[in-house]
Image (spheres, grey):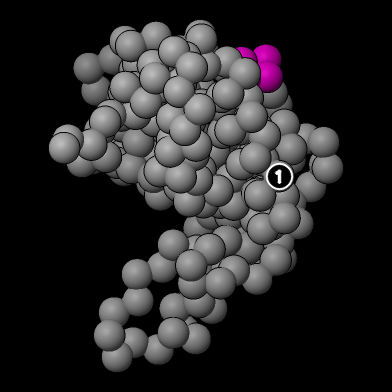
Amino acid sequence: MSVPSDEALLAAHLRGDPRAFGELVARHERRIYGLCLRILGNREDAEDAAQEAFLAALRKASSFRKAAAFSTWLYRIAVNAATDQARRRGRARLTALDPEDAGLAVAPGSDLGEVVASTVTVQTALTQVPEEFRVAVVLCDLYRVPYADAAQILEVPVGTVKSRVFRGRSALADRLTDPTEPTPTPTPTRPPLRVVNTAGTDPRSPASDPRDPDHPPGE
C-alpha cells in the first residue's frame, strides 16, 4: 500500500478522518520543533511554539490550498509561532542542547562532547543575531529552504531574503569571533508575519548564494 502524501492526509482530515491529522503531526513534529528551537534557543519555548504551530495548522486546515506544499505551509505557521513566542518573552533564553535536539549526525569514532560543544557555541551566537536575520539563516542555511520559498514564507522579496541571510551570516561570524561584541538591532521594515499559502520547498535545492545579496544577479 502506498504511503499517503501530506496533502492527502490533510484532505482526509477535512473529510472527517480522526487519525489523519495525528499522522501529519507525527511526520513533522521533530522538524517543526527543531525549527522553533533554532529560532528560540530554548527547549521549553520551542516545545510551546511547536505545539502552537500545530494547533494553528489544525485551526487553519481549511485554508490550505493544493498550490502550496503542506510542509512549506507548515513552516510558515511554525516561523510565525516561534517569532510570536520570542516577542512575548522579549529575549532569547538559551539552554544546553542534547544531540537529538540539535539534530546532530555524529560520525562513528568522533568526540561527541566536542560536537555538542561546537553546536551549543553556534546556537548561543545564533540567538544573539537579530531576529529577522536569524530566521532567514535558519531557513536557508540550516533547513536548506530555497530563497524563493523562504521569500514566500517570510512575505518579503527574494532579494530581501538574500540580504538577510548575508547579514545574518556576518552577524553570526562576528558573534563567534567576539562573543562580547553587541549585535545591533535592525529597524523593523515589515509588519508581523501572517499565515498565507506558499509554494512548495525542495530540500534538495541549494541553500544560498554566498555573494552579497544587496545586488543579486538577474533580479
Q: Name the quadrant of the N terminus.
A: top left
> Could you tell me which residue is drawn at 59 percent across and 69 percent down?
97
Residue 33 locus on image (x, y percent)? 55, 48
Q: At label 1, which amino acid type do we have?
A: Asp
Q: Is residue 171 visible?
A: no
At horizontal 37% and vertical 26% (from top left) the residue drawn is: 9
> Residue 165, image x and y in percent?
45, 38
x and y percentages locating residue 22 in the rendered image: 50, 37
Residue marked by disc 1:
48
Instruction: Pick whichever, 40 or 43, lies toward us.
Output: 43
Q: Residue furthest left?
A: 1
Q: Is residue 128 magenta?
A: no
Relative image position of residue 56 (x, y in whole percent): 63, 24
Q: Main secondary structure of the magenta part?
A: loop
**Image quarter in which the C terminus is found:** top left
Above or below residue 181? Residue 162 is: above
| Between 202 and 28, the one nearer to me in the picture | 28
In this rendering, position of residue 199 left or right of residue 63 = left
Q: In the structure shown, which secondary structural element does the residue marked by tag 1 occupy? A: helix
- Can residue 88 be seen in this snapshot? yes
For image coordinates 40% across by 49% down, the residue present is 142
Closer to us: 145 or 47: 47
Asked if residue 70 is positioned above or below residue 140 in the image, the reply reads: above
Question: Which segment is the magenta one?
Answer: 190-194
